Amino acid sequence: MTKRIALYFGTDTGRTRRIAKLIAQKLGDRALAPANIGRTSVEDFLAHDTLILGTPTYGEGALPGLSTGLAQESWEEFLPRLQGRDMRGKTVALFGLGDQDKYANEFVDAMLLIHDAVVDCGARVIGTWPAGGYSFKASQALIGNHFVGLALDQINQATLSESRIDAWLAQLAGELG
Ligand SMILES: Cc1cc2nc3c(=O)[nH]c(=O)nc-3n(C[C@H](O)[C@H](O)[C@H](O)COP(=O)(O)O)c2cc1C
């Protein structure tokens, strides 16, 4: 039996948790229940071979965490604990929430910080996503004309999210083989 996909999210106002739950629902028994990264140990995280990781961007292009005003730990505190750990052989897909209108120069930037942290640990990242169809000025999360993961904007383009998720999950299924 193939092992199930683990889903971890950071959130302040709950949007990224709701999207993680929607993704889990769509994956059915292929996925585990989504968990808040702020309440996750590195050991639990590393127990999985395939992970979907979601984050909002806070501050100006920063990870969610205590320094961006969250009441609890999140990706900002978790990623340093991951440093130096071995993720070779693991596959990661990323999704990020942001606001392309108000934060047009830092749209979904935080995805890159998670991307770089897991790549440094040896993980393979799949699920890059074309930047067409969004309206922003700059994003650190772009490599060429693709985001390092699925970009979602629940403030300005909420009605597009579900079809984006469906297309992205179909793409992931193909990339996972
Ligand atoms: C103080 C503040 C700073 C933000 N900074 C950014 C940013 O730099 N880039 C971006 O794309 N979105 C930014 N956002 C938008 C959030 O990422 C967006 O509202 C997201 O949906 C929040 O997700 P959550 O409900 O899971 O916390 C910011 C929002 C707030 C309130």
Image (cartoon, rainbow, N blue to C red):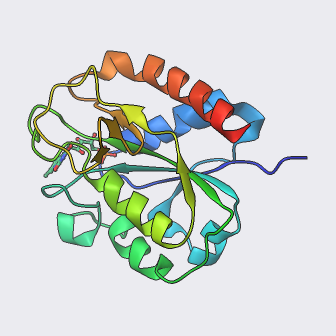
**Residue at 67% of width from left, 30% of height from top?**
174
Residue at x 33%, y 55% (from the top left corner) = 112
Image coords of residue 42 (percent x, y)? 57, 75
Q: In front here: 59 or 123?
A: 123
Q: In this rendering, would 99 be left or right of 170? A: left
Question: Where does the C terminus fall, quadrant-wise?
Answer: top right
Of 132 and 12, nearer the camera is 132
Image position, residue 153 (x, y; %): 28, 31
Residue 37 picture location, percent across and down:
48, 62
Establish if 175 lies above or below 165.
Answer: below
Q: Is residue 65 above or below residue 154?
A: below
- The residue furthest right is 1
Q: Is residue 127 above or below residue 52?
A: above
Q: Residue at x 27, y 19 (%)?
A: 133
Q: Is residue 74 visible?
A: no
Residue 14 visible here: yes
